[in-house]
Image (cartoon, rainbow, N blue to C red):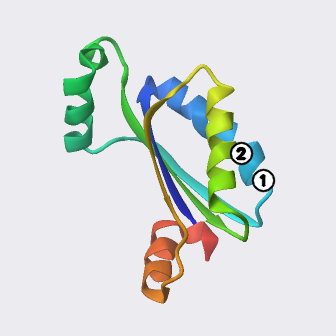
């Protein structure tokens, strides 16, 4: 599974969110978190147009990517991770992308992106 969260806030808030995911992820045999990282410039520019307050202080758009290896209902896992986010002081920017990867070519791509899952 590959899940990407787009979050708006400070770097410290984004780190807090990544930490909040751990209890949910620990129920899987293998998982890896990449980030938080600043979102690509084009994505950040789009959020700044919609939310002018992003230019104030240290708030910016962050992306946290999660890779999971295991079985389970993907939507239920995403719901649990979103609940973990809500337990922090941080709120998602409203964009969560997720997918189960079945195709062998895509699996190779995911394993390259998340080497700890191999």
Helix, strand or loop status at disc 2: helix
Question: In the rendering, at what x and y percent does residue 85 appear?
Answer: 62, 33
Label 1: how many Cα within 10 Å (few below 14, some 14–19, many 20+): few
Relative vertical location of residue 89 with respect to residue 14 in this rendering, above or below: above
In the picture, the quarter occupied by the N terminus is bottom right
Question: How many residues crowd around disc 2 within 10 Å: few (fewer than 14), some, or many (20 or more)?
Answer: some
Compared to 80, does 60 lie above or below? above
Q: Cβ–Cβ below 8 Å for labels 1 and 2?
A: yes
Quarter placement of the C terminus = bottom right
For the residue pair 104 and 29, the one nearer the viewer reads as 104
Where is residue 48? Give x, y as percent. Answer: 23, 26
Of all residues, the one furthest to the right in this rendering is 27
Measure the alpha-carbon separation of dots 1 and 2. 6 Å
Label of residue 26 in the image: 1
Task: Tell which of 38 and 71 is nearer to you.
Answer: 71
Circle 1 sits in a helix, a strand or a loop, which is it? Answer: loop
- Say left or right for 19 vs 103: right
Q: Which mark is residue 111?
A: none
Which residue is labeled 2 in the image? 22
């Amino acid at each position: 599974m590959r899940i990407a969260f787009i979050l708006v806030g400070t770097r410290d808030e984004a780190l807090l969110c990544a930490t909040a995911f751990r209890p949910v992820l620990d129920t899987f045999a293998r998982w890896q978190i990449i980030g938080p990282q600043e979102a690509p410039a084009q994505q950040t520019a789009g959020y700044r147009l919609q939310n002018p307050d992003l230019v104030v202080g240290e708030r910016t758009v962050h992306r946290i990517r999660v890779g999971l290896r295991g079985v389970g209902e993907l939507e239920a896992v995403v719901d649990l991770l979103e609940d973990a986010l809500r337990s922090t002081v941080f709120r998602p920017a409203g964009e969560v992308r997720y997918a189960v990867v079945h195709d062998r070519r895509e699996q190779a791509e995911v394993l390259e992106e998340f080497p700890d899952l191999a």
